[in-house]
Amino acid sequence: MKKKHIKEENRAQAEAFCRMQGDELELIKVYAEDFRAIIAEFELKNGRVPTADDLLWIESQRQGRDITQ
């Protein structure tokens, strides 16, 4: 059975959202689904939860811009 790392996943997402500019609730609406997909893919590939830096970098690459600005 796959072990879930819910606390670590939530912590990484919360930290990533805090580092972004703008209204946090609006950012969640825009990026939460992508962050969940990134976390799932990352865990399958790397066997660990991505850091906030990982989330921000991967999503910035997908968007073609720095999403923290």
Image: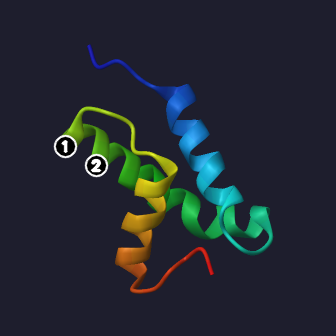
Callout 1: helix, strand or loop? helix
Residue at the spot of label 2: 41
Q: Position of residue 47 (x, y in %)?
A: 24, 32
Say whether marks 2 and 1 touch (CB < 8 Å).
yes
Mark 1 residue type: Lys
Which label is found at residue 21?
A: none
Figure check: 48 above or below 22: above
Left or right, 61 with respect to 46, comes to right
Query: Based on the displayed image, in which of its 4 quarters is residue 50 positioned?
Result: top left
Q: Position of residue 35 (x, y in %)?
A: 48, 56
- Residue that extends furthest to the top in the rendered view of this protein: 1
Q: Residue at x 58, y 38 (%)?
A: 10
Determine whether 46 is above or below 61 in the image.
Answer: above
**Residue ID at (66%, 62%):** 19
Q: Which mark is residue 45?
A: 1
Say which residue appears at 34% left-offset and 44% top-offset: 40
User: Which residue is more in the foreground, 32 or 69?
Assistant: 69
Q: Amino acid at mark 2?
A: Glu
